Image: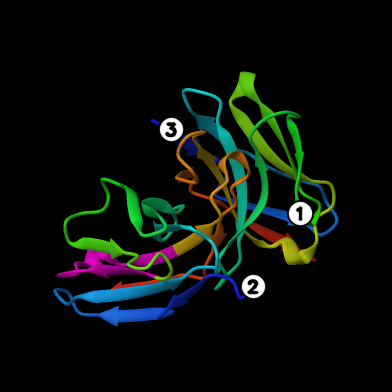
Amino acid sequence: AQSVTQPDIHITVSEGASLELRCNYSYGATPYLFWYVQSPGQGLQLLLKYFSGDTLVQGIKGFEAEFKRSQSSFNLRKPSVHWSDAAEYFCAVGGTGGGNKLTFGTGTQLKVEL
Amino acid sequence: DTGVSQDPRHKITKRGQNVTFRCDPISEHNRLYWYRQTLGQGPEFLTYFQNEAQLEKSRLLSDRFSAERPKGSFSTLEIQRTEQGDSAMYLCASSEQGGAREKLFFGSGTQLSVL
């Protein structure tokens, strides 16, 4: 069965500092990997997605993620965090044949200090 | 494009009552998904439709849960004889069918509280 682990429940960074959110997945084949962001009262918004090709994926809002098959990881990074990035971030894995039936991690709550 | 719309935003009910939620997807999106999110957890897949056909249901979806999408547009999710464990955010998402490039658009959800 597929699964996702986000080991950090909460992370606090200073505005302008770099950010890395960790994600490890378990999946039997080549996965589709996703990062979503959820702000209070808002729906989930897709930041980026990996399904093939270049293992470094660029997303919206200046985020990027790197797929490392050997480590079963898909960590999210941003070089300089803005106060508006404070939100909850979810990593998810999906199969190649099942549409967007996704398995999500438990999320990482990001706090940005001014 | 008005986005995915869910109604109501909040629902408080007593244990044992039936509740129904509605989801209006982005027009022309032929896939519609229901997810459930409990506090401190990520969303969990419940079911999805392609047009009016319900193609998959999670084992999480007990017999008390039923979802419909009668004309391939809006969808309803009904929970019968609600239990306190049903308290959660129910999320709807839609997409255009499209293989690897399929992209989900989520609504803001319906927060259910069962007293």
Magenta region, residue range: B75-91
- Of A3 and B97, nearer the camera is B97
Quarter residue B77 falls in: bottom left
Q: Position of residue B95 (x, y in %)?
A: 54, 56
**C-alpha span from label 3 to label 2:** 33 Å
Q: Write down the residue under mark 1.
A: A60
Question: Which x, y percent locates residue B47?
Answer: 35, 53
What residue is shown with label 2? B1
Chain for disc number 3 = A
* In this view, the mark in front (1 or 2): 2
Which is in the foreground here, disc 3 or disc 2?
A: 2
Query: Which label is found at residue A49?
Result: none
Residue B35, image x, y percentages:
41, 57
Neighbour tally class for label 2: few under 14, some 14-19, many 20 plus, Cα within 10 Å: few
Q: Residue at x 42, y 79 (%)?
A: B7
Image mark 1: chain:
A
Q: Which residue is mark 3?
A: A2
